[in-house]
């Protein structure tokens, strides 16, 4: 009986082009997900401040894009006729627990506050009053909806946030 040895040289059978295409699509998908993740979870960079200018209007309408935590959301705002910006809006007069917390109790409280803010803003007709800019470049505003004249007061009344008047913030962990 004659046995033949296989030749394990550097020669390979050519692969189907579909395998290469599939691998390429998977790699592109992973790169796209990584780019989205990096962009959506990076803290706000104050150097990239939107052009609010000195003369902000008293009241503007806002379209909520997403809620980041219990006292901040991202919105598309028409600051001046023809000038629409996408910016983060910080609720005036309220402090909610942080999602990136030091303890589990604060993390749970932050999720509750975020859901409460999402539910209130879902009423629609969101308007921003008494506009200014905070130290992080966010638009600081008193926020109202169709059903809620002051969103911050409702969050405080529900017990998911506390009043905040500027300066040092106390932690939420014991």
Image (cartoon, helix red, strand yellow):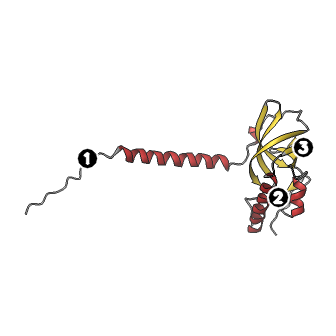
Depth check, front residue: 150 or 44: 150
- For image coordinates 48% across by 49% down, the residue present is 26
Sequence-first disc among 1 and 2? 1
- For image coordinates 54% across by 46% down, the residue present is 31
Q: Describe residue 32's horizontal placement relative to residue 61 as left or right.
A: left
- Residue extending furthest toward the bottom: 174
Q: Which mark is residue 96?
A: 2
Classify mark 1: helix, strand or loop.
loop
Sequence-first disc among 3 and 1? 1
Classify mark 3: helix, strand or loop.
strand
Q: Which residue is mark 1?
A: 11
Q: Looking at the picture, how far across and down is residue 160, in whole percent?
A: 83, 62
Question: Of discs 3 and 1, which sits in the foreground?
Answer: 3
- For image coordinates 88% across by 53% down, the residue present is 148
Mark 3 and 1 residues: CB-CB less than 8 Å, in contact? no
Q: Looking at the picture, how far across and down is residue 32, in whole percent?
A: 56, 45
Q: Which mark is residue 129?
A: 3
* Relative to 131, residue 104 above or below: below
Asked if one can make out residue 127 in the rendered structure from this viewpoint, the answer is yes
* Relative to 37, residue 98 above or below: below
Q: Looking at the picture, how far across and down is residue 52, in whole percent?
A: 83, 35
Question: Of discs 1 and 2, which sits in the foreground?
Answer: 2
Quarter of the image for the C terminus: give it: bottom right
Question: Of discs 2 and 3, which sits in the foreground?
Answer: 3
* Relative to 6, residue 84 above or below: above
């Amino acid at each position: 009986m004659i046995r033949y040895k296989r030749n394990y040289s550097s020669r390979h059978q050519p692969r189907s082009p579909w395998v290469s295409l599939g691998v390429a699509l998977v790699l592109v998908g992973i790169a796209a997900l990584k780019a989205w993740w990096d962009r959506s979870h990076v803290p706000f960079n104050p150097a990239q401040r939107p052009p609010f200018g000195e003369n902000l209007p008293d009241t503007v309408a806002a379209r909520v894009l997403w809620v980041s935590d219990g006292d901040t959301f991202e919105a598309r705002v028409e600051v001046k006729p023809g000038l629409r910006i996408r910016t983060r809006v910080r609720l005036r007069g309220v402090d909610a627990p942080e999602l990136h917390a030091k303890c589990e109790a604060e993390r749970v409280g932050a999720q509750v506050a975020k859901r409460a803010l999402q539910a209130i803003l879902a009423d629609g007709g969101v308007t921003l009053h008494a506009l200014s800019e905070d130290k992080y470049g966010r638009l600081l505003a008193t926020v109202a909806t169709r059903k809620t004249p002051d969103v911050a007061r409702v969050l405080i009344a529900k017990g998911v946030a506390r009043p905040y008047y500027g300066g040092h913030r106390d932690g939420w962990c014991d």
